[in-house]
Image (cartoon, grey):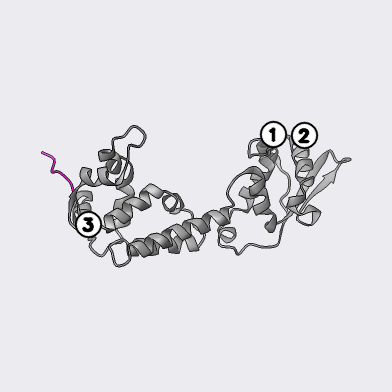
Amino acid sequence: MEYNEKNLPLAKWLIDKTNTKDYRIGNLLGMKHPKVDGDLLKIVGGRDELVRQAKVLERIPALGGEEYLHFDWREMNTDITKIDYRVEVIPGLCDLIGVIDPRERQLQAITRVCKLQEDVSGSCLFAYCNHVLEQLNKGNTKELSKAEDEEFLKCLKALADLKEPEWKRVFSSKVFEKKNDITPSKVFERIYQGAVIEALKYSPQYEEGMSDDEILAAHGILVIPRH
């Protein structure tokens, strides 16, 4: 049987329970001992489901056996009061239900941003990359979705590579393909402009009080004046 977070929510709960800043930066080790409570029972679908899923997890050799994952059985193996598990079991649980390990996800994001930082070295976006890496290396996730968005990273590189100013919609057409029924010339404005402007606020050319159009213009993206 193929397992996932829908048919084995207990595994996902253990992963989520462990997904902290310390875990994401590799500083969380040792044993955890969460107690079974009403919230967990609601998530897994009730006590009978908790018992069923625990027995499934116990039978999977790749998780390392009782040393790594142990259930505190009561009432002739029909109830569980506590779960004891080693943090090191989490990657195996992630593999089992087909989700990315939060630590691995953080590392992949760091790798992507390091690559972007190399590509934009010496440009207005270098300081922004420093900021994102600092956040990711602390285990924070605020910048994680941006660091995982290949289109956003491609847009930042294209911006850093600009040799001369371009009209916003021309720039957008060159960088993007059609996305969510939005024509290429409007993808930048509709989807990525806000995030790019936030990134450009770390640029040496940014000055407090600049409008969005002024920030873009200072970095080579021109907006047709509104009349």
The label shown at residue 131 is none
Of labels 3 and 1, earlier in sequence is 1
Q: Is residue 95 above or below residue 162?
A: above
Label 2 Cα neighbours within 10 Å, binned few <14 / some 14-19 / many ≥20: few
- Tell me which residue sits at (14%, 43%) in the image: 224
From the image, tell me which residue sits under label 1: 45
Q: Position of residue 178 (x, y in %)?
A: 32, 37
Residue 39 in view of the camera = no
In this view, the residue in front, 143 or 163, is: 163
Q: Which mark is residue 219?
A: 3
Is residue 124 located in the magenta-colored stretch of the structure?
no
- Residue extending furthest top? 181
* Residue 7 appears in the rendering: yes
Q: Which quarter of the figure is the N terminus placed in?
A: top right
- Indicate the secondary structure of the residue bearing disc 3: loop
Q: Is residue 92 above or below residue 120?
A: above
90 relative position to 193: left or right: right
Element under disc 2: helix
Which residue is painted at 76% across and 54% down in the image?
64
Kindly report the distance in space between the C-alpha atoms of the residues bearing marks 1 and 2: 8 Å
Q: CA distance from mark 3 to mark 1?
A: 53 Å
Q: How many marks?
A: 3
Q: Return the disc, 3 or 2, that comes first in the chain's sequence.
A: 2
Percent x, y for residue 122?
Answer: 29, 67
Outermost residue on the left side: it is: 227
- The residue pinned by badge 2 equals 48
Question: Dot 3, how many residues are within 10 Å of its Cα: few (below 14), some (14-19), or many (20+)?
Answer: many
- The residues colored magenta run 222-227
- In reply to whether residue 226 is colored magenta, the answer given is yes
- The disc labelled 2 sits on which kind of residue? Asp
Mark whose residue sits in front, 3 or 1: 3
